Image (cartoon, rainbow, N blue to C red):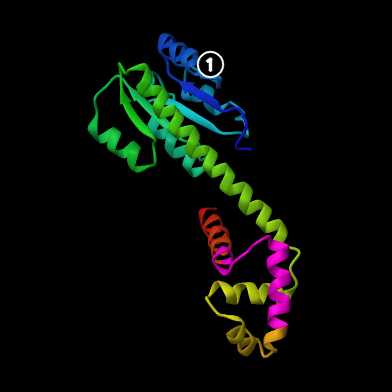
Amino acid sequence: MSSDQATVYVVDDEIQIRTAIGSLCEETGHKVRLFASTDEFLAERMSGGPSCLVLDVRFPGTAPTGLELQRRLAETGVPIPIVFISGHSDVRVSVEAMKRGAVEFLPKPFREQEILDAIRHGIERDRRRLEREDTVREARQRLKTLTARERDIMLLMAEGLVAKQIAARLGVSEVTVKVHRARMMRKLELRSPIEVVRLIDSISREAEAT
């Protein structure tokens, strides 16, 4: 998934701004989707690959503001990285946007390299997220192949216990623990106890995020 072509979504009511950003992104090899309002963007079906959202802060009429869209995306579990742009200097708004995880907040007019760098950082962030999700998803599938005994040993290894301690905890021989441990490590495609800890930690963090 990390090798998929990235998509850049540009939401700005000024046609000159959104088309200029869109052209820049196309020149750097990205797919581009342009929207005149946050309502238009909300009606869009997003791609499954890496992406970044370039979002103006203010919109005319009753359309959600950029901050409102950021909040709505977070509430609905859409973790797209956001680069805010704005024609108004508002420290409070920029601070709030960054606290909520925005990649960057750029005042208009901005330099081409500034917006391209911010978009690149956003796409890289999203690629890393997708790669982590892929890793956890594959690990969950491998976990399903473990026996109850292998799962018990894996969890005790994650607590830092060695074979002798695990054997005492489970009431089995140390040889039995080593046999099951070897099978468990092979099924999970892991090579060391630290990798077991990292796997459990990754799955736990993903569960907390959802």
Q: Which residue is mark 1?
A: 26
The boundaries of the magenta stretch are 176-196
Residue 101 included in the magenta stretch of the image = no
Rendered image quadrant of residue 66: top left
Residue 184 included in the magenta stretch of the image = yes
Q: For the residue labelled by badge 1, is the local secondary structure a helix, a strand or a loop?
A: helix
Up-down relation of residue 169 to residue 28 (above or below)? below
Up-down relation of residue 81 to residue 205 (above or below)? above
Is residue 65 visible to us here?
Answer: no
Rendered image quadrant of residue 192: bottom right
Is residue 180 visible to us here?
Answer: yes
Q: Residue at x 39, y 36 (%)?
A: 102
Between 74 and 98, the one nearer to me in the picture: 98
Rendered image quadrant of residue 156: bottom right
Q: Can you name the residue that lies furthest to the top here?
A: 16
Residue 9 rendering spot, x and y as whole percentages: 51, 24
Residue 173 rendering spot, x and y as whole percentages: 70, 89
